[in-house]
Amino acid sequence: MGKNYYAHAHEFGNSGYDSSAAAGNIPTHPIIFSKPCTSVSGPGDTVDSSLDPYDTLDYEAELAVVLGKKGRVAPGDDPLAYVFGYTW
């Protein structure tokens, strides 16, 4: 999810990379995006900062929710019954 915290939205808005909104603008709904497995580093992996010639390397926290079964949550259902697990 992106730009869902005031401090992050403000930082990103002032970074020069956000052309979609004014600085500090927090969306009314969460921004959800996917990340391909080829862009993820494993625990203890070295991040090659030489690929970032502008020294803009930043940290991020990622959370993945692993769904355990197909379906739609109906009224009265427990939504967490559809969750197999979590990872970060």
Image: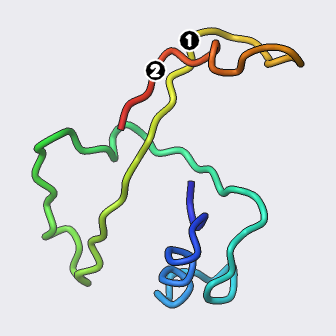
Query: How does the figure colour the protein chain or chains?
Result: rainbow
- Residue at the far top: name it: 69
Which numbered disc flags the more N-terminal residue, 2 or 1?
1
Q: Categorize mark 1 by other alpha carbons within 10 Å: few (<14), some (14-19), many (20+).
A: few
Q: Position of residue 80 (x, y in %)?
A: 63, 20
**CB contact under 8 Å: marks 2 and 1:** yes
Question: Taking 72 as reference, is 55 left or right?
Answer: left
Q: Position of residue 16 (x, y in %)?
A: 50, 89
Question: Taking 57 as reference, is 88 left or right?
Answer: right
Label 1 secondary element:
loop
Q: Which residue is located at x 13 percent, y 60 percent?
A: 48
Q: Would you place residue 6 above or below residue 43 in this image?
A: below
The one of 87 and 17 positioned closer to us in this rendering: 87
The one of 23 and 20 positioned closer to us in this rendering: 23
Image quadrant in which you'd find residue 23? bottom right
Q: Which residue is located at x 62 percent, y 9 percent?
A: 69
Q: Which residue is located at x 58 percent, y 50 percent?
A: 33
The circle on residue 85 is: 2
Quarter of the figure that contains the C terminus: top left
Q: Position of residue 14 (x, y in %)?
A: 51, 90
Q: Position of residue 29 (x, y in %)?
A: 76, 58
Q: Which residue is located at x 50 percent, y 15 percent?
A: 84
Residue type of the residue flagged with mark 1: Gly
Image quadrant in which you'd find residue 49? bottom left
Q: Categorize mark 2 by other alpha carbons within 10 Å: few (<14), some (14-19), many (20+).
A: few
Question: Taking 52 as reference, is 48 left or right?
Answer: left
The circle on residue 68 is: 1
Label 2 secondary element:
strand
Image quadrant in which you'd find residue 54? bottom left
Residue type of the residue flagged with mark 2: Gly
Question: Taking 52 as reference, is 60 left or right?
Answer: right
Q: Would you place residue 56 above or below residue 46 in this image?
A: below
